[in-house]
Amino acid sequence: MGIEVASEVIDLILAEAAAAHPHECCGILLGIDGRIENAVPCANVHPEPARHFEIDPSALIAAHKAARAGGLQVLGYYHSHPTGYAEPSATDRAMAAGDGRVWAIAAGGRIGWWRACADGFKPLCP
């Protein structure tokens, strides 16, 4: 299973992960027809940002409103694992909605691409 991702999105996520270290960065993946065209960095509002992430709810609301107004669709989310791997953690698995959205996880200078399905995360190939 694959996904199309603009190269600028990859560059942005890796730069955000490096800049946020030792905390987790996070943001929203936007696109159309399954192609991720843009990534929007968001504030990590989790009280323990070195080990968890929570996208600022106001940023999520704004992204969904923009999509309803004809903008790019919210296709998924990204975050980093500063001391982990580019794959879903136990916390990620517990928190995922299983709604089919894409999760990009940056760690160690690379990005793992995943789809949150009802029965767990499935790997994607960009």
Image: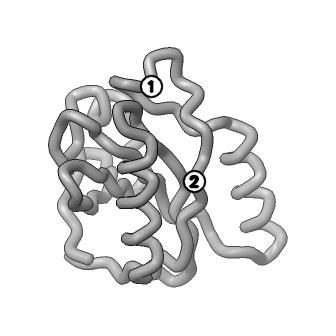
Residue 118 percent across, percent down from the top left: 31, 46
Task: Give 74 or 52, whichever is nearer the viewer.
Answer: 52
* Residue plotted at (29% across, 27% down): 91
Question: Marks 1 and 2, how far apart in space?
Answer: 15 Å
Q: How many marks?
A: 2
Q: Amino acid at mark 2?
A: Pro
* 118 on left or right of 99: left
Query: Dividing the image into 4 quarters, which one contains the C terminus?
Result: bottom left
Disc 1 residue type?
Pro
Circle 1/circle 2 CB separation < 8 Å: no
Which percent across, then down, holds residue 80?
A: 34, 44
Which residue corresponds to the image point at 27% horizontal and 35% vertical from the top-left? 93
* Relative depth, front residue between 32 and 51: 51
Q: Residue at x 62, y 69 (%)?
A: 73
Q: Residue furthest front?
A: 19
Position of 61 relative to 35 (above/below): above
The residue lying toward the viewer, choosing from 80 and 96, is: 80
Graded by Cα atoms within 10 Å as few (under 14), some (14 to 19) or many (20 or more), the crowding at tag 2 reads some
- N-term mark: 1 or 2: 2
- Residue 72 left/right relative to 87: right
As drawn, the residue found furthest toward the top would be 47
Callout 1 crowding tier (Cα within 10 Å): few <14, some 14–19, many ≥20:
some
- Which residue is labeled 2 in the image? 41
Query: For numbered disc 2, what is the local secondary structure?
Result: strand
- Quarter in which the N terminus is drawn: bottom left
Q: Quadrant of residue 31?
A: bottom right
63 vs 32: above or below: above
Residue 96 in the image, given as x and y percentages of width and height: 38, 38
The residue under the point 67% across, 47% down is 60
The disc placed on residue 49 is 1
Kindly indicate the quadrant of the structure image that contains residue 69. bottom right
**Residue 114 spot, x, y in % from top left:** 27, 58
